[in-house]
């Protein structure tokens, strides 16, 4: 975050970062790190670049940066007033404009990024989810412009959480909040269990999640909130959650996700979890 939007780091945060860097260096000496994606051994010298201790340069390049994307709908292209992705999104959600002010994504839900997201969503995928959040947090300018005062994950219904063992959106939100130096607030709950969005046609997805979220806790999470999910496809889930936040009194909702799937993609292929 920029100096205007984020509070200065506390002494505790500075000490913690310093201790973590020291521990990482010591660990690297004892156990040479391997790329979390391809397993190749990583060099011991990383010049203070924390991501270089988790990812090799080749995988890092593959996972981020597949070209310019609209900063409102996340689809490929320059964006702007006539963005076809935005038009399709608003038509599908039956709204005049996207319910969030900005959407930051790493890339499209294809190839190695898709594989990485699917791994991160599975049990024991937390480490990879944290690395993906670190990659996302490198979009410094976008997050600085948002100047958010809280990060809120898309919640998972307890029944699904029981089966999966992890909520990737929660891990992503936690790591992003830490890197952006703002609090993570679990400000939303799932009111009811819904079929997975990917199991439904695009047209049915808004109805599936409509009214499925509710506010959690009585305190406002913040005025400028960053809503975090792992994958955005039709935008129906983000829209339903955004609506609850705005109705709760949040002034501006921003959104971030690891990947943006085309709504025609089979985003559930290969994911055997409900
Ligand atoms: Zn690699
Ligand atoms: Zn757009």
Image: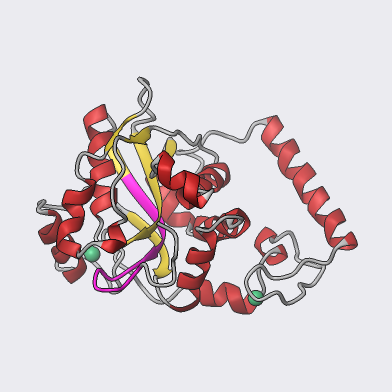
Q: Is residue 85 left or right of residue 33?
A: left
- Could you tell me which residue is drawn at 28 percent across and 47 percent down? 194
Q: Quadrant of ligand 2?
A: bottom left
**Front-lying residue, 83 or 93:** 93
Q: Is residue 175 above or below residue 222?
A: below
Q: Residue at x 75, y 64 (%)?
A: 47
On the question of residue 1 being in view, the answer is no
Instruction: Residue at 10%, 60% (x, y): give it.
Output: 91
91 sits to left or right of 176: left
Residue range in magenta is: 254-267
Q: Is residue 239 above or below residue 55?
A: above
The C terminus lies in which quarter of the figure?
A: bottom left
Toward the right, the furthest residue is 30
Task: Report whether residue 83 is seen.
Answer: yes
- Residue 76 in the image: x percent, y percent? 30, 73
Please determine whether, in this image, residue 60 is positioned above or below residue 16. below
């Amino acid at each position: 975050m920029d100096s205007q939007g984020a509070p200065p780091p506390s002494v505790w945060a500075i000490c913690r970062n310093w201790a973590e860097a020291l521990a990482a260096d010591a660990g690297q000496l004892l156990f040479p790190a391997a790329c979390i994606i391809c397993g190749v051994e990583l060099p011991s010298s990383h010049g203070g670049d924390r991501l270089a201790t988790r990812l090799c340069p080749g995988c890092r390049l593959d996972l981020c940066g597949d070209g310019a994307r609209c900063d409102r709908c996340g689809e490929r292209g320059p964006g702007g007033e006539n963005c076809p992705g935005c038009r399709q999104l608003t038509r599908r959600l039956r709204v005049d404009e996207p319910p969030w002010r900005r959407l930051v994504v790493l890339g499209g839900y294809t190839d190695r990024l898709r594989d990485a997201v699917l791994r991160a969503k599975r049990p024991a995928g937390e480490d990879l989810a944290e690395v993906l959040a670190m990659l996302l947090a490198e979009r410094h300018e976008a997050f600085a412009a948002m100047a958010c005062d809280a990060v809120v994950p898309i919640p998972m219904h307890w029944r699904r959480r029981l089966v999966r063992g992890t909520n990737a959106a929660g891990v992503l939100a936690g790591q992003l909040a830490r890197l952006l130096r703002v609090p993570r607030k679990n400000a939303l709950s799932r009111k009811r269990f819904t079929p997975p969005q990917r199991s439904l046609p695009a047209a049915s997805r808004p109805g599936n999640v409509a009214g499925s979220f509710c506010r959690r806790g009585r305190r406002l999470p913040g005025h400028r909130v960053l809503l975090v999910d792992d994958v955005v496809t039709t935008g129906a889930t983000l829209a339903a959650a955004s609506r609850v936040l705005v109705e709760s009194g949040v002034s501006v909702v921003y959104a971030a996700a690891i990947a943006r799937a085309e709504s025609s993609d089979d985003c559930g292929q290969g994911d055997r979890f409900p």
